[in-house]
Amino acid sequence: MKNLVQIQLLFFFLFMFSCSQENKEKDRTPSSKHLTDNILQPKRSSDFMAFKYEYSTVDLYREFSESIMDKARSEVEILESVNRQGRYKPNVESLKLHEVPEWFEDAKLGIFLDWGPWSVPGYAPLKGAEASTGGSYPDWYEFLMDNLYKEYHDEVWGADFRRDDFLPLLTGENFNSEEYMLLAVNSGAKYFVPFTKHHAGWTMWESEFTKRNAVEMGPGRDIYKELIEAGKKYDMKMGFYFSVSEWEYPVIVDQNLSQWDPVKNLAIFQDALGQIPRATPLASYFPALHDRMISGKIPVKDYFADYMIPSFKEAVDKYDPDLVWYDGGWGSPVSISRTMETSAYFYNQAEGKKDVVINNRAGSSLSEDDLIKVRDLMDSGKRDEAMKIYLSGQQLGDYGTPEFTIGDVDIQSKWEVCRSISPAFGYNWQDDEASSLSGEELIKLFVDIVANNGNLLLVISPDGSGKLPDIQKDRLLELGDWMKVNAESIHNTRPWKVQKENDKFFTKSKDGKSLFVHCTNWPGENLIINTPIEEGIKGIKLLGSDINLQFTKASNGNLEIPIPKDFQNNPSLISKYVWTFKIDLN
């Protein structure tokens, strides 16, 4: 699975880079080609006014940069001190010693709250719900509005409508943290991961290291704090989603401040996107363009030391998450992004306090030179050579994270697939029943994932007001209804020696005392299990019923279970879509 995930990530960011060059804007207002009468479609209002933050990028430099960099140095020193004294060191060998905590093995289901400024336009081309279509990315709208989505954006919002004009429209008036947490609990989820900092750099928490945060811009509230408090109330493990990289960040390139010229001496760090290093990581800074793309970002000299590391530490210290879900590291070298330092800190600060876990998207253990060589080989068409080098690296973290599609997995290693009920990562106003998984499809997918030692991190995507689409809410409740009957066969289980037999999936309780058989079709008059069960059998029940079932076990270990006639007429009264038989073992 590790190789599969690395291939997916490499191809993903190479594809995204090919789309990242800005098209020249045309001065035109919206036309009607992409406009519809659908009341769900977000669109430009007649009283549109361009967003202008009270501080320009130059103002932020003059008033805040030096003090922020001083504070950053202090915070990094504390982080380094903790790591020197702690068990985990910022190197590959030490970090590999960390084990996946039992609670994460037990949890099986998490909720991934995909919400931010991209939720306002809520658009990506529509795809079908089946995994073969791949995911779609409304949460990349702020970046793709200038290339892949440009035609749509210019016609629905206008070419003069820029990225940061979405910020005041992210009102969040319908965003209710407790309601979402209760919905997660009722679905059977055990952990909750909000999009606390995506690739455009807007943070859900009130940060001292950026003005581009939920209190300063958008809802005017510390959304992450609200979610953390709701999570504690319902005993939910809480995650911290953190994009290591951002699409752009303003950096100070001239230390001779007495000759300061803002246009000449500020630059845009484009390689903060975290892709394979390019020869020129800096681009020219143009106030007219960038001040409505990077509002609130305080210029610093070193993106990683002065901003990324201290903002990570700030959120970990303030909100004490149980899980770090890195993103945006992809194939970038951890030696540059310094995520080995942040990972070691997260482990060390939790030591003796609670068990924590980190996903595997912090970056690659390959050196910058290795990754440049990979890039050059890919550019010259030598893909096989490039992949051989690339796959020799390690994606650092406790578990793998395939996205939307799963592919081949190693059941000896813990993994988690993130996907949504539709293909969309982020709110898509076009989503409907046809583009969404049915309740039956969702439950069968979930059982398949769990049987193969995976977790499902299920994306939910409110709109810009914070309202969750009814389809997503209904699917969570339907999954929750199934879990009320069958949770025993999901939570606190481990893979069996065989994961699947025809239309049946297997799990085993972690204490080894029970085997669970998940039938994705009603078995009819007899349930037959051909895979030998070596242990003795104490009894068998269908979850949702108290009736002890008769069974015959052949000398070769095969098992036949006659199904009572009372169950045949309407099996959906017991459970829907998947029926689980519990076999108690001696």
Image: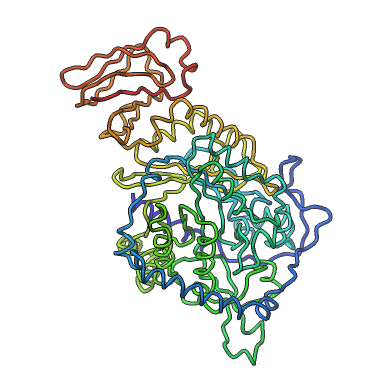
In the image, taking residue 461 as reference, residue 391 lies left or right, namely left
Give 508 or 45, whichever is nearer the viewer.
508
Find residue 362 and report its image quarter. bottom left
The residue depicted at 73 percent of the width and 54 percent of the height is 169
Give 226 or 244, whichever is nearer the viewer.
226
In the image, taking residue 297 as reference, residue 13 lies left or right, namely left
**In this view, 211 is above or below 441:** below
**In this view, 408 is above or below 188:** below
In the image, taking residue 150 as reference, residue 407 lies left or right, namely left
Find residue 196 and report its image quarter. bottom right
Q: Residue furthest front?
A: 352
The residue depicted at 27 percent of the width and 14 percent of the height is 551
Q: Residue 212, position in %: x, y?
A: 65, 64
In the image, taking residue 270 as reference, residue 412 lies left or right, namely left
**In this view, 189 is above or below 383:** above
**In this view, 498 is above or below 462:** above
